[in-house]
Image: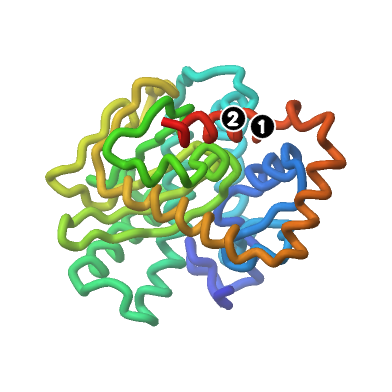
């Protein structure tokens, strides 16, 4: 956890609040709909109670984000998770929320990139400029974020996977629909840089630079009034590699879990055997099993 002394957004030196990178309501929903304990890939043997958070923002800036977060929760996240709607009308509040979400990840990742020389100088300088543009937009000092693009990809049920048979055996439905994660990636050869955030199957991909081979259909969120649907979305992108990496990381964490923890999971499943069909993950298990057969 980084120990910041100034608000990452406005720069005021004051007492900072614990800010969730992925909104708290996502973790709250995950816990509410889970069969057992929540675990993360860093240490799968220890149950977790909360998602990643840092002392990052002052109270005023935290409040600045909260209204837009509520808008996202009420108009997109909860209706989608409850399977009430797959078509969503939105306004500029969604764009602001998505910017605030990816900005938090980018800001912290830039600290890591700086300390550990993770990316080359060209990519690093480009990301720094994007962080500045996003921060100024969030502070209402500019009306746009330049060429940066926000895309939402809904991880709907997969009937078959062509060209990537490896993914079929990695339980994509269960992993993505029960996952919370956010980080910045760079494919420097393709000049595709972005931040990817998984909110229980709602994938936000913010592209800071888009390579010439990237194709995104029916996924982009504009800065204004718009419409998006959780169907007929298609992407051809290096981001597909990130999806696979997420699944491999989750599988590796599962494989490294101790026998004692595995026994606890089995015991919990047996205790709730009569109610398992009522949990969202049950359908994901069925979908993954069917996918793995093909």
Percent from the top left, x then y, of residue 191? 18, 57
Q: If the image is split into quadrants, where does the N terminus sit?
A: bottom right
Residue 191 visible in the shown view: yes
Locate residue 97 relative to residue 118 in the image: left or right: right
**Residue appearing at x 37%, y 81% in the figure:** 116
Residue 71 visible, this angle: no
Observer-nearest of 47 and 125: 47
Element under disc 1? helix
Figure check: 207 above or below 216? below
Would residue 49 be found to the left or right of residue 24 on screen? Answer: right
Q: Is 126 placed left or right of 43 in the picture?
A: left
Question: Residue under circle 1?
Answer: 282
Image quarter hosting the C terminus? top left
Q: Are marks 2 and 1 in contact (CB under 8 Å)?
A: yes
Residue appearing at x 66%, y 47% in the figure = 27
| 105 vs 202, nearest the viewer | 202
Q: Which mark is residue 286?
A: 2
Give residue 175's position: percent from left, percent from top: 55, 45
Gap in angstroms between the C-alphas marked 2 and 1? 6 Å
């Amino acid at each position: 956890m980084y120990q910041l002394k100034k608000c990452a957004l406005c720069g005021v030196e004051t007492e900072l609040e614990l800010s969730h990178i992925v909104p708290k309501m996502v973790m709250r929903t995950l816990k509410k709909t889970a069969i057992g304990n929540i675990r993360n890939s860093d240490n799968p043997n220890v149950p977790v109670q909360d998602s990643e958070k840092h002392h990052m923002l002052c109270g005023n800036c935290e409040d600045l984000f909260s209204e837009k977060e509520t808008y996202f929760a009420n108009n997109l996240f909860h209706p989608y998770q409850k399977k009430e709607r797959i078509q969503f009308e939105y306004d500029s509040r969604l764009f602001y929320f998505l910017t605030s979400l990816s900005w938090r990840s980018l800001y912290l990742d830039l600290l890591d990139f700086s300390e550990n020389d993770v990316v080359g100088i060209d990519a690093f300088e480009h990301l720094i400029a994007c962080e500045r543009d996003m921060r100024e937009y969030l502070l209402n000092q500019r009306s746009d974020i330049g060429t940066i693009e926000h895309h939402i990809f809904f991880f709907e049920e997969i009937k078959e996977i062509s060209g990537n048979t490896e993914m079929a055996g990695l339980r994509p439905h269960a992993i993505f629909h029960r996952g919370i994660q956010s980080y910045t990636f760079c494919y420097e050869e393709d000049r595709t840089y972005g931040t990817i955030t998984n909110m229980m199957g709602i994938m936000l991909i913010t592209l800071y630079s888009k390579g010439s081979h990237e194709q995104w259909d029916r996924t982009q969120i504009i800065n204004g009034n718009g419409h998006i649907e959780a169907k007929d979305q298609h992407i051809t992108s290096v981001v597909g590699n990130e999806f696979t990496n997420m699944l491999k990381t989750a599988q590796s964490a599962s494989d490294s879990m101790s026998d004692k923890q595995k026994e606890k999971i089995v015991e919990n499943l047996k205790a709730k055997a009569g109610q398992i069909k009522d949990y969202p993950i049950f359908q994901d298990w069925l979908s993954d099993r069917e996918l793995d057969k093909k």
